[in-house]
Amino acid sequence: MASSLAKPFIVIPARGGSTGVPRKNVRLLGGEPLIARTIKTALASTLPGRVAVITDDDEIEEISLHYGAVVTREEKTTGKATLDQVMVRTIPFLRELGATDADVLLTMQPTCPFITGTRVREAMKAFADGAGSVITVIDDRHLAWRLDEGGNPRPDYAARVNRQQLPPHFRESGAIIGARIGDVVKFETRIVEPIRLIEVPEGEALDIDTFADWAIAEHLATRRRILLRTDAARELGMGHAYRTLALAYALARHEITIVLSVDKPLGVGFFQEYPFRVETVEDELAFLNLARKTRADLIVLDQLDTHQEFVALLGEHSKIVTFEDLGSGAEQANLLVADLYENPRVPADRQLTGVQNSILAPSFESLPRKTKFRDTVEDILLLFGGTDPSNLAIKALEALQSIAFKGRVTLVRGLGASLVDPAKYSSLDLQILSNVKNMPSLMAKADIAISSAGRTITELSCIGVPTLCLAQNAKELTHTHTTVNNGVIMMGLGSLVSTETLGAHINKLCDDAELRRTLHDRALSATAGRNNTSIVARIMRKLGL
């Protein structure tokens, strides 16, 4: 008979003799014993005196008592007794804890560590609504096969269709099975009609039996909620958006949300074609509310200068990483990543600096691409960021035309950059590209490059391309990576460099193979070993995540 007053008594069976994963129930998962996760979930769902661990192991008993469960011991067995039989034998102990026939016995397996208290509440509601048993299940529909009486394979489906078109096929997850105590005694089983199935998502359905399962559990136990806050606009450029995208790929095993300003549509349009969740906010208050709502473990701010009060509010519940930040917020953040320039007001132990901490597009790591050094310059690549606000591409093209360069010239224009009319440079063998998907492959074809002073410099260094650099603005003049040691000749503020001066530098670099060889070698040496995986691991380690 249904009763809304039934109390849950949760029993966690935990033998000590696991063979697939030795010492499985006490092995540390995310810094705590595996069984502790189920005990904590159970204790959050009922009173402490109603959570019991059944074990034959001294260590499991000690750990269970430490985390707040009561313990009853069983003799060591061969493991052939069914859980129904074990539960029937345990009911007298539950009665000592105050259980009655009308109360509910819920078996929760410690090998299903990600089941949530929500499922316990769903189970108890099902009993209140008249269920005789509850079983957690996962929809495991597939094109399955069986063997007939003669041992011949036969399809276990009516029609060969896509998986999603098959009828539901539920597999027990093992996380929760329950029935009323009186029914368990009467029928000697926890499966009593009417049965209610509680479907759980894949993570909650994980039942650890092998080390492969354990690897999945470690992934789930260390998965974080991460907000990546950035923007893209003509005056801001596209570099922040590209770095955020690269960071999202490097952190993709976590729960990622990219947050953009609603009034900066360039960034919103850019991220639409990528497989990440995107949210827009109107202002800092809206972002603060979003961060609190999502209970983010980590917030990454890639917006340039931040304010101390804002970062302090964000940091009340989350770890904060900020990029390229010279604002007061950098002093409040847990970590500053400043690969282009240091912030002198932030202690060195809270900064990651230099090209070895530069996040690049993952395509720069998929193959060991390097430009092939040639004694003559046949290909020049022009790269001036996503927006090129100072129109440095025009100056570079005019300089190349003035020196009558006869090789191939490739100009890459970003999404926010103004159009260039190739007819004005008809004397050049010019190709203009936009929205390039494989930038490393394009860079590897270049003998030299002309670029502004953003992260493109580090990308070119990774490929070993000797580079002439023109700063878009005064802030780019402070970037510390535009040095000869990184394969770069820095010419200063682009707007102050004349076409004639730029042309002379291009001629010098084209004519001096030894100089180009030195720049090529130094660039590769400076960036050797740099990779996004190591940088992200470094960040997470410093944050204790």
Image (spheres, rainbow, N blue to C red):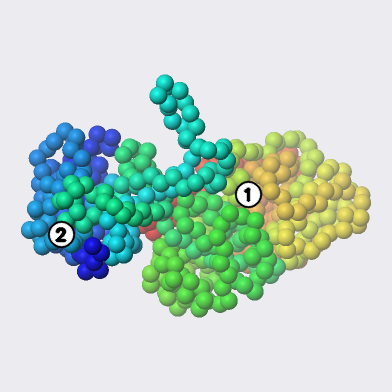
Q: Position of residue 420 (x, y in %)?
A: 84, 59
In the image, residue 401 above or below residue 235: above
Kindly identify the residue that appears in the image at 31 percent across and 39 percent down. 209
Crowd around label 2: few <14 · some 14–19 · many ≥20 (10 Å) = some
Q: Nearer the viewer, mark 2 or mark 1?
A: 2
Residue type at numbered disc 2 = Asp
* Mark 1: secondary structure: helix
Q: Is residue 374 visible?
A: yes
Q: Is residue 398 left or right of residue 351?
A: right
Residue type at numbered disc 1 = Glu
In whole angstroms, how far apart are the C-alphas of marks 2 and 1?
A: 70 Å
Q: Position of residue 303 (x, y in %)?
A: 56, 68
User: In front here: 488 or 333?
Assistant: 333
Residue corresponding to mark 2:
101
Snapshot quadrant of residue 40: bottom left
Disc number for residue 459? 1
